[in-house]
Image (cartoon, rainbow, N blue to C red):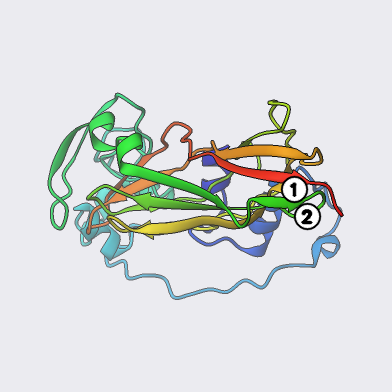
Amino acid sequence: HYDVFSDVGACLPRRDSVDERIIDQAKKKTGRIINSQSEVGGWPKLESQPAPPDRDHDGMPDKWEERMGFNPDDSADGTADSDGDGYTNLEEYLQEKCVGLDHTVIEGDKFAFDWGPPGPPFKGTRDEFLNASKDLSIRLSSDKTIYRIGEPVFANLEFTNDSGYPFWIHPVQASINNPLEIVDPSGKKAVWKGESVSSVDSESPVLAQETVTVFSDFNCSKEYDLSKPGKYKMRFTSGLRVSFRDETGKSGGLQPDHLKSNWVEFEIVPRK
């Protein structure tokens, strides 16, 4: 579900109100077929901008061609397939596919990537490039340690880039993929109600050694059954999608296995 919800839409990296509504309804498992646009607020306001310069009129902007090593004065490279993956260079641009590098690198697969300045050149395997246990720190916290029955239990998640490479973190689509593991007082996993999760809603740059907030004040009481009094513990167990980019904009997408944060303990006590 990560790729579907993070990449779908006609106008990435931003989405219009129609895409936002449909994706939100899909996450919440709501929505229905409509008979008229008036049922959902009418037609959205569509704003346009001037087209980027394209000297050879091949459909690919000059700056994008220069960045990817193409000739902005040669229209023939629009129909060429420079990386031999079955997509023309124009299709690569339209689909925002990265020429010469797969979007997703599966653990253990061989790939080569030369960062150039400011990062050191690197060639190797996914395991050597991104060691989830060493390069990615995920810290879960809660506002308090004791909550009364019915009181909101809030969780906060921070993500730290411990590597020497800058990269981007993509939206955490956790509303479909149960984001937290919560153990109730009886030792069983708390029941997940499957409602929405507040998370980063667009790509966020993460510099080397930088910490960013993935979500804050996530209401666990709304998402999970925390009605039993007693001691609980919880941790983050969902996935994070990451893109590595050099200063020219070339990138390679990685979707690490589900990563686990620290355990956070809290207690639910009866109301007085």
Q: Determine the residue located farthest toward the front in the rendered image.
A: 272
Q: Residue at x 35, y 36 (%)?
A: 132
Taking the image as shown, residue 207 lies to the left or right of residue 240, namely: left
Residue 151 is tagged as 2
Residue 105, picture quadrant: top left
Residue 198, horizontal then vertical, whole percent: 62, 55
Q: Residue at x 74, y 45 (%)?
A: 268
Taking the image as shown, residue 47 lies to the left or right of residue 252, namely: right
Mark 1 vs mark 2: in front = 2
Q: Amino acid at mark 2?
A: Glu
Pointer 1: what residue?
A: 221
Q: Nearer the viewer, residue 157 or 66?
A: 157
Instruction: Evaluate if marks 1 and 2 touch, with contact meaning CB atoms under 8 Å apart.
Output: yes
Q: Residue at x 43, y 51 (%)?
A: 159
Q: Secondary structure at mark 2?
A: loop
Residue 40, picture quadrant: bottom right
Quadrant position of the C terminus in the picture: bottom right
Mark 2 crowd level (few <14, some 14–19, many ≥20, 10 Å Cα): some
Q: Amino acid at mark 1?
A: Ser
Residue 222, horizontal then vertical, whole percent: 76, 49
Q: Secondary structure at mark 1?
A: helix
Residue 131 is tagged as none
Mark 1 to mark 2: distance in Å?
8 Å
